Image (cartoon, rainbow, N blue to C red):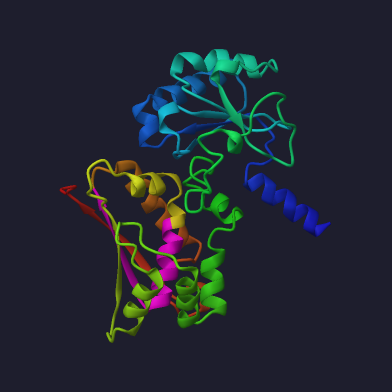
Amino acid sequence: EADKDAMELLSVLKMEKVNKPTIFIGMGSCGIIAGADKTKEAVEQYFAARNIDAEIIATGCLGICSLEPLMDIQLPGKNRVCFQRVTFNKVNPILDSIFNSILIEEDVLAQYRNQFSEPYEQVSYLDELPFFKHQHKNITAQCGIINPISIEQYIAYNGYKAFVKSITGKSPQEVIEIIDKSELRGRGGGGFSTGKKWKIASNAQSRKKYLICNADESDPGAFMDRALIESDPHRLVEGITIACYAIGASEAYVYIRNDYKIAIQRLQQAINDAKNYGLLGENILDTGINIEISLIKGAGAF
């Protein structure tokens, strides 16, 4: 019975189960540029005018920016379904239709798989779309799906589990060996071994060590860092904490361009929430480990 209750809570935290209409709107930079802020305003007005109790959640980027603004709708007992190019003038017709069990075919992108709810007939699943079916998402697996400013939801998706497992059950050297054996490499072009980099930093003799995370991505047209931080900032925080533990650093700095207003706001909230949960700061989880993360804003020059 306890396991059943735990699974129920987990499914609620993951938004697999909802008890009222829940609307997810892609509010990363790409979505906002396409008009997602006006879409969100139209959704809020729709429910306010009809006195309907609904939850509206801003998410990050799903990864298919050309179809923004993206809006997902999940009704109690039904699968979450994603609608494409939902400009503000399309909000009322889409909501009116789905509340009457009708889907406007031209507006539907796909539905999400969910073992706890009823699927829509003749609607493709997201992982079946040509754009997504050959992708295997790792770091970006939850981007555009979870609420980026909810640490509870991140934890529900096994967030911070790897960090806690590392600091309570692995030595720094064991963590480095795991990373080394994984053959994880840098994605900046050089493909340098992450495990080797961590070994060098770990072996360096110093009274105090610092970790620097470069999120400035000054290459023209690049926005991988921005999209990840806007969509799943706790992922970056957890990666930094694991790296700090492995190399023996007690302070970390994220260098991020000042233009990334949304990313900065969400990352700072993630840092604050992690600290409030005892996952950052002094004597983390009574392990004697201290880790602080600070943001440094850059001018954005190449």
Name the residue rendered at 41%, 32% in the picture: 65
Where residue 298 appears, x then y in whole percent?
A: 20, 52
Residue in the image at 41% along x and 73% along y: 195
Question: Quick check: 245 above or below 84?
Answer: below
Image position, residue 296 (x, y; %): 24, 57
Relative to 213, say whether 225 is above or below: above
Q: Nearer the viewer, residue 276 or 85?
A: 85
- Work out whether residue 192 or residue 96 is closer to the camera in this orientation and state it: 192
Q: Residue furthest right?
A: 1
Residue 208 appears in which quarter of the rendering?
bottom left
**Is residue 145 visible to us here?**
yes
Residue beneath the point at 69% across and 40% down: 114
Q: Which residues are magenta?
A: 236-257
Q: Determine which quarter of the picture holds residue 134.
A: top right
In the image, is residue 286 part of the stretch drawn in magenta?
no
Quarter in which the N terminus is drawn: bottom right
Residue 214: % across, % down: 28, 58
Q: How many marks?
A: 0
* Observer-nearest of 185 and 262: 185
